[in-house]
Image (cartoon, rainbow, N blue to C red):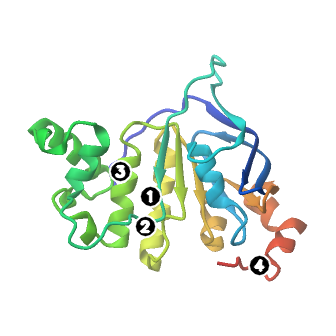
Amino acid sequence: MRKIIVPCGLHCIKINHLGVTLGGQEILKDINLHIHCGSLNVVIGRNGAGKSTLIRAILGDIPHIGNIEFKDRENGRIQKLKIGYVPQSLNIEKQTPVSVYDMIASYQSNVPVFLMRGKKIRQQIEEHLEIFEVSHLIDKQVCNLSGGEQQRVLLSMALLNSPNLLLLDEPVSGIDKNGMELFYRTIYHLKENYDLAIILISHDLEYVRQYADKVVLLDGSVRKQGSVREVFQSPEFAQVFGSGKEET
């Protein structure tokens, strides 16, 4: 992977008293998180704990209470937060004639993709894909990408607009061990070399142990947050996971 060093601007993101109620049921209650750029923050919890709901609330896809602040610690300014998002998977039917180029070009602009086939745009997309070593996939149909290829293309697309926060909602579901290793090394590269914070939803506790800077144990509310050691050795972790293995 090509190395692009971007110095940290000391940004921080605060999620204050976030709550979500859907269909009369309280899914999330009083979520408070403080996240810094250059950090990998992993949210863990058993099935139904509200992990994906938290991502959807941060994205603004569902109604919620509370607020999200984005500040530059150098001058204290509150700015608009730019978010990049990688979902669990893409639901694209086989034989759908959409190439990687088409998908990324249409994501960048509201202009119909057939009006955007210029050398300059193609070069820009190729250069961005090359950061993740997938520029050779630019003309491949998205429906024919492997899980690992799809993941790296989606990461490339999520970073197009230089987000301050990257949200990853279990993007390694169904990927083999080699793909998992590559994914976590890629995420480590991003947090070391880009001026952004990362929130990753994961059930892969051994990888969380190895790579996470901060861990958030979620079960409707934040049961525990802190370093890997602080969370994994806590009574709250034992209560949620029992034997130490997450329910999936």
- Whether tag 4 and tag 2 are in contact, CB under 8 A, the answer is no
Residue 212 showing in the rendered view: no
Q: Distance between the residues labelled 1 and 3?
A: 11 Å
Q: Which of marks 1 and 3 is in front?
A: 3
Q: Is residue 187 above or below residue 62?
A: below
User: Residue drawn at (36%, 59%), measured in percent from left and top?
Assistant: 152
Number of on-image labels: 4
- In which quadrant is the N terminus drawn? bottom left
User: Residue drawn at (54%, 65%), measured in percent from left and top?
Assistant: 170
Disc 1 packing (10 Å; few <14; some 14–19; many ≥20): some
> Which amino acid does the dot numbered 2 rest on?
Leu
| Residue ranking furthest to the front | 23
The kind of secondary structure element at disc 3 is helix
User: Residue drawn at (90%, 68%), measured in percent from left and top?
Assistant: 235
**Which residue is denoted by mark 3 in the rendering?**
156
Q: Earlier in the sequence, mark 1 or mark 4?
A: 1
The tag on residue 112 is none
- Whether tag 2 and tag 3 are in contact, CB under 8 A, the answer is no
- In which quadrant is the C terminus drawn? bottom right
Disc 2 packing (10 Å; few <14; some 14–19; many ≥20): few
> Which amino acid does the dot numbered 4 rest on?
Gly
The tag on residue 244 is 4
Q: Earlier in the sequence, mark 2 or mark 3?
A: 3
> Which amino acid does the dot numbered 3 rest on?
Ser
- Whether tag 2 and tag 1 are in contact, CB under 8 A, the answer is yes
Q: Earlier in the sequence, mark 1 or mark 3?
A: 3
The kind of secondary structure element at disc 4 is loop
**Which residue is denoted by mark 1 in the rendering?**
186
**Which residue is denoted by mark 2 in the rendering?**
182
